[in-house]
Amino acid sequence: MPYNDLKMELTTAEENYLKAIYHLSDGGKKSVSTNDIAAEMKTKPASVSDMIRKLGEKEVIQYRKYYGVNITEDGKRRALQTIRKHRLWEVFLVEKLQFAWDEVHEVAEELEHIQSPLLIQRLDAYLNFPKFDPHGDPIPDEFGDVRARPRVALNEMEIDQTGQIVAVKDSSAAFLRYLDKVGAYIGARIKVLDKVEFDGSLEILVDQKKTLFMSKDVAGNILVLQS
Amino acid sequence: MPYNDLKMELTTAEENYLKAIYHLSDGGKKSVSTNDIAAEMKTKPASVSDMIRKLGEKEVIQYRKYYGVNITEDGKRRALQTIRKHRLWEVFLVEKLQFAWDEVHEVAEELEHIQSPLLIQRLDAYLNFPKFDPHGDPIPDEFGDVRARPRVALNEMEIDQTGQIVAVKDSSAAFLRYLDKVGAYIGARIKVLDKVEFDGSLEILVDQKKTLFMSKDVAGNILVLQS
DNA sequence: AAATATATTTAGGAATGGCTAAAAAATAAT
DNA sequence: ATTATTTTTTAGCCATTCCTAAATATATTT
Ligand SMILES: [Mn+2]
Ligand SMILES: [Mn+2]
Ligand SMILES: [Mn+2]
Ligand SMILES: [Mn+2]
């Protein structure tokens, strides 16, 4: 029996899968494979097969056996709602509870599943309707609309180009703590001083005073709003 | 195999049961029956039998078949930790997010299960180390110590006695909204003006200006610090 | 002390969300 | 066009947490 009840609640596990599928599909643009979902969720492909069958029945994804999944409009809406909650909680933890930006992800991963529209509405107001989370990721509004900024990976910028760090691609604690150590942060004004042909590493000027050397890998995870 | 690992994590369901057992046992003083737990948890006695066997294996309760359960010291510690989290979140919702005191319980029932010692420590500090929740219930400290105030049910006070409302026994939305409507609140100074012999109903003076009639049942759910 | 009533446990089953191992389908290589 | 490799699904199992129905133990009456 197909689930025609569009207000069907998702479980915590289903929300986590749906969020992963949303991210892997680049916001619904690409279709996603069982294996990729398994890797992202740190689980086994067999478990993913089970879960995507259920998500298909609930019509938050479209699922054709052996051909991967595509997120539906309803699924996208729900994923964005969970992402909105995740990022609002991250702002709360950093702005109000003095968490470091590398300490918030795991806790937000739990908090995002609390079911209370009133709570999120009030939290949003309490935080002054923030538009970005501590990692620079945009916070969808209550209708799921995301206002994206044009941004480019730092490793793709040319010598002498300038801009402002607005986000990180990798939100792992290890990477964020490394950025803390070298003094890179969201909002910093930067200029590319040099690019090494051989390995793609860069020399960056931060806030017109500090010089920084970084590998291509590191620069690839830093997103810049060019100016 | 008995679980000798005292750091064994409890599931959300187990935490809820343990909290119920703690409350029903009056903080570990009485032993608690399967039926009472089933009523409190709005579940079936058969399900309770299953669960208390497991809680016994994890040594948070002592369980003898057919003779009810007693909470252990470890169980008490864990229950108080969950209660602490529940009440801190209630304070947060009321003080910071403008929730009414009758809107917080269900959400706190979810939030109390978030696993992050840092989160609770920071929340506590952010709220200025509150000692009581919005319903007047004491908040255990991080070691599980509760500083209880001497308090008496309003229906047991005599004519002309005075005091201050410090808590409610019943935290249901219906009861709390009734108190809002008649103008009774935590902190209000009261005096018993009259007690009707026939049905035990009372006439109360609130804040030296407003007169209130209430049934014995209502008064029995209002707790007063006498003065 | 039996008989009756109440409380509790056991048995068996459903739904959820994992797992491993084996089968089957799709894709890549020869 | 086969063969080999990779991907995905299926089958069967386990742990949780709930349920109903039946069995059994305890408590209360007579
Ligand atoms: Mn999550
Ligand atoms: Mn983030
Ligand atoms: Mn709870
Ligand atoms: Mn409370």
Image (cartoon, coloured by chain):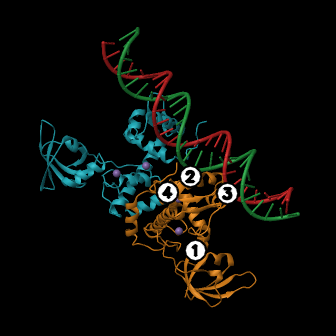
Chain colours: A orange, B cyan, C green, D red
**Which one is closest to the eye, mark 2 or mark 4?**
2
Q: Give the percent coordinates (x, y) of residue A210.
A: 59, 85
Q: Are marks 3 and 4 on the same chain?
A: no
Q: Amino acid at mark 4?
A: Pro
Helix, strand or loop status at disc 3: loop
Picture layout, residue B154 above or below residue A162: above
Question: Label 3 vs label 4: CA separation?
Answer: 43 Å
Say which mark, if any, is on residue A54: 2
Residue located beneath label 3 in the image? A66
Residue at x 47% of width, y 41% of height: B73
Q: Chain of mark 4?
A: B
Question: Label 2 vs label 4: CA separation?
Answer: 34 Å
**Which one is closest to the eye, mark 4 or mark 1?**
1
On the rendered structure, is A186 left or right of D27? right
Residue in the foreground of this view, choosing between C23 and A84: C23
Q: Give the percent coordinates (x, y) of residue B138.
A: 34, 51
Helix, strand or loop status at disc 4: helix
The answer to whether the residues at label 2 and label 4 have Cβ atoms under 8 Å apart is no
Question: Label 4 vs label 1: CA separation?
Answer: 27 Å
